[in-house]
Image: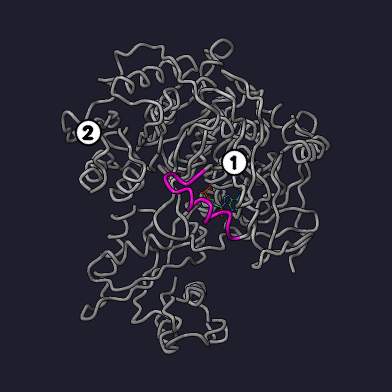
């Protein structure tokens, strides 16, 4: 069915100098499964512990005996591991390079010494404002150094940070603030993206007017664009005013390995976003080790991950992994296509970036602009490329490899999820031959398996649902405030295993090919959007009676959002109303959730028991402008009213 993929063998330059060779990968992988305590106990020595762990792995996915605990008598502080321990040997080394939105604004280089000072000062300020161990702090910032500083300052005092992506609107902020019970919010006057201003502080103000947000006592505001913003004293305080006079040393909190480090909300197939909770020891061991191994990290690397800190990739592979490893990480505020489509490549030349990690959607968008903007730059500094967030189509892979990397740099296609903490399936550049579109092989300690819909294991070649058989240190520990939902979502579908929600194929070489979500989650430009959230935003509009949302293939975004809307009786469809509804979703959730297509649906296809048959809606949306014969819709015999489908097929929007 699938023709054999082209294989790109390990480059000799990598094979010769790598940390992990092909043989070592096999030996260590086997050891990681056979002797997990010995394996991870040794790996954990890479961190500085205040009390070294003697217990390593204590986990079970069996429902009657469920537990996930790693290194659970160990004590450490994440900020000490990311900062203090580098001061002696790397004090003057650049920890963060900040490249602002505008290429005309000066870049900044922040050394480990300076970063340590700035984190300590903010940590002291937070303590002075009454924030302590276990308190939740919301971070709603643009991609500026303060975002990393805020996360590390929370970690220093044992506060649990909860970062909200700057593209989310007031309602989404309020939901998250309320669910997490945050005491303090760190934001900025405004963000900047492609020269446009994002009204962050105003969004926070609007969020705090919504119910459930009373827990917030203080809002710290970073002066970024220096725009005039409404400051409500005594609640709102300027960041610099509270931080400037603080001492440059701050006693770190001793944290148990299993104490929470952060909460990050992510969309699922049902209900509100889940607060994914990660703890300190296992998470830090895992992100630091994967960052070093997958990116074959060397001391003089300049590493750039283009993700936003509002997503897990930013947490694990801009902040915690790289800084725990004493690396130099670039923080970029802008977008790939502004002022023009060569910005990424110009930034690579400007800062001599050696490792570049981005999303397939960005590659596809830039590929559309042709080779010119890439060829105008040198990119000679690059030695390794990476992708994350969604499956990469082989055409985009080849363009990335040949045009961006001049056929010189391996590509690590890294598959993982917010829930996983760090990379689970990826090539190691000195050990793994590459196949375009495959995330290749599991990382140490990771046991993927493929099951059919009944949970029967598929061995060897085959396709089905991807599960993981045993725990790894970076795994999430619970859904904040709802442990039952954690168990029900991930461990009940295929008992005894962690269910990823992804479909997957394994080829004859044992390589994994992720085929995308198998649940009601849409992956838009690498961002997870729950169809249920977009539907509830649509029905919150007073002219909407009912809505159903599905994904459809989109050239740039990977998947786009297709909404079917039934209006309340008496309301007439119009272009103006269509635009109003799209705007409504932007305002309710944020721009990333705005439907690409909105089709009026006089009725929705339902079963006799009233369940919407999304499978049919998906087929209609996927068909686009191509012919759609009735037999292509699959089994429609359980429909309550088959005529509904005919009218939807006739009136479909052509994406
Ligand atoms: C890290 C991150 C997770 C979902 C995941 C899958 C998709 C991520 C991928 C990939 C194919 C890759 N995904 N990486 N699919 N190949 N290399 O993206 O986390 O935002 O939680 O999304 O993204 O569908 O289930 P998150």
Where's the C terminus, which quadrant? Answer: bottom left
Tell me the magenta residue range: 478-493
Q: Residue at x 44, y 56 (%)?
A: 529
Which residue of the protein is positioned furthest toward the front in this rendering? 64
The CA span between labels 2 and 1 is 46 Å
Q: Position of residue 411 (x, y in %)?
A: 66, 43
Which one is in front, 157 or 615? 157
In this rendering, the count of numbered labels is 2
Which one is in front, 639 or 105? 639
Q: Residue at x 62, y 42 (%)?
A: 423
Disc 1 element = strand
Q: Residue at x 27, y 71 (%)?
A: 544
Residue identified by numbered label 1: 68
Mark toward the start of the polypeptide (2 vs 1)? 1
Left or right of 314? Residue 394 is right
Left or right of 241? Residue 590 is right
Q: Position of residue 653 (x, y in %)?
A: 41, 75
Which image quarter: residue 218? top left
How many residues crowd around disc 1 within 10 Å: few (fewer than 14), some, or many (20 or more)? some
Residue identified by numbered label 2: 227
């Amino acid at each position: 069915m699938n023709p054999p993929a082209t294989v790109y063998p390990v480059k000799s330059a990598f094979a010769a100098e790598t940390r992990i060779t092909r043989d070592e990968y096999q030996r260590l992988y086997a050891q990681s499964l056979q002797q997990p305590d010995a394996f991870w106990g040794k790996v954990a020595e890479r961190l500085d512990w205040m009390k070294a762990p003697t217990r390593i792995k204590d986990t079970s996915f069996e429902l009657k005996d469920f537990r996930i605990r790693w290194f659970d008598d160990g004590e450490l502080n994440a900020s000490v591991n990311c900062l203090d321990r580098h001061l002696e040997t790397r004090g003057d080394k650049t920890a963060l390079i900040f490249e602002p939105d505008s290429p005309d604004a000066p870049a900044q280089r922040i050394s480990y010494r300076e970063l340590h000072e700035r984190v300590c000062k903010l940590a002291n300020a937070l303590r002075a404002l009454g924030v302590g161990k276990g308190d939740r702090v919301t971070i709603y910032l643009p991609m500026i150094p303060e975002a990393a500083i805020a996360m590390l300052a929370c970690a220093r005092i044992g506060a649990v940070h909860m970062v909200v992506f700057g593209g989310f609107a007031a309602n989404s902020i309020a939901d998250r603030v309320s669910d997490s019970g945050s005491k303090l919010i760190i934001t900025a006057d405004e963000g900047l993206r492609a020269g446009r201003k994002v009204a962050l502080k105003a969004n926070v103000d609007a969020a705090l007017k919504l119910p459930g947000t009373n827990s917030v006592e203080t809002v710290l505001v970073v002066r970024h664009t220096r725009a005039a913003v409404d400051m409500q004293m005594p609640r709102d305080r300027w960041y610099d005013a509270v931080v400037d006079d603080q001492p440059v040393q701050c006693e770190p909190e001793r944290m148990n390995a299993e104490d929470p480090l952060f909460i990050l909300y992510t969309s699922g197939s049902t209900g509100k976003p889940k607060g994914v909770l990660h703890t300190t020891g296992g998470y830090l061991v895992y992100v630091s080790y994967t960052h070093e191994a997958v990116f074959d990290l060397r001391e003089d690397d300049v590493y750039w991950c283009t993700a936003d800190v509002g997503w897990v990739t930013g947490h694990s592979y801009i902040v915690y992994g790289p800084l725990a490893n004493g690396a130099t990480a670039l923080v970029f505020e802008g977008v790939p296509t502004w002022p023009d489509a060569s910005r990424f490549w110009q930034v690579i030349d400007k800062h001599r970036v050696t490792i570049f990690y981005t999303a397939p959607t960005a590659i596809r968008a830039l590929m559309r602009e042709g080779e010119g903007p890439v060829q105008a730059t040198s990119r000679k500094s690059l030695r390794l490329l990476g992708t994350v967030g969604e499956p990469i189509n082989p055409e985009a892979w080849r363009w990335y490899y040949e045009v961006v990397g001049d056929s010189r740099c391996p590509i690590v296609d890294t598959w993982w999820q917010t829930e996983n903490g760090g990379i689970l399936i990826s090539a190691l550049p000195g050990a793994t031959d590459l196949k375009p579109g495959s995330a290749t092989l599991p990382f140490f300690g990771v046991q993927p398996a493929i099951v059919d819909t009944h949970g029967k294991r598929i061995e060897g070649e085959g396709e089905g649902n991807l599960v993981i058989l045993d725990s790894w240190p970076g795994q999430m520990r619970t859904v904040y405030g709802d442990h039952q939902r954690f168990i029900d979502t991930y461990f009940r579908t295929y008992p005894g295993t962690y269910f990823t929600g992804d479909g997957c194929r394994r080829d004859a070489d044992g390589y994994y090919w992720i085929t995308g979500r198998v649940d009601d989650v849409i992956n838009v430009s690498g961002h997870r959007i729950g169809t249920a959230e977009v539907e509830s935003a649509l029905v919150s509009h007073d002219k909407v009676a009912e809505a159903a949302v599905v994904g459809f293939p989109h050239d740039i975004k990977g998947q786009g959002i297709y909404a079917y809307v039934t209006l309340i009786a008496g309301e007439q469809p119009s272009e103006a109303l269509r635009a109003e509804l799209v705007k409504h979703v932007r305002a309710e959730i944020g721009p990333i959730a705005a439907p690409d297509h909105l089709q009026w649906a006089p009725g929705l296809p339902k079963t006799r028991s009233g369940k919407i048959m999304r499978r049919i809606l998906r087929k209609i949306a996927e068909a686009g402008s191509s012919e759609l014969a009735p037999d292509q819709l699959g089994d429609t015999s359980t429909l309550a009213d088959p005529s509904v489908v005919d009218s939807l097929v006739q009136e479909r929007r052509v994406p």
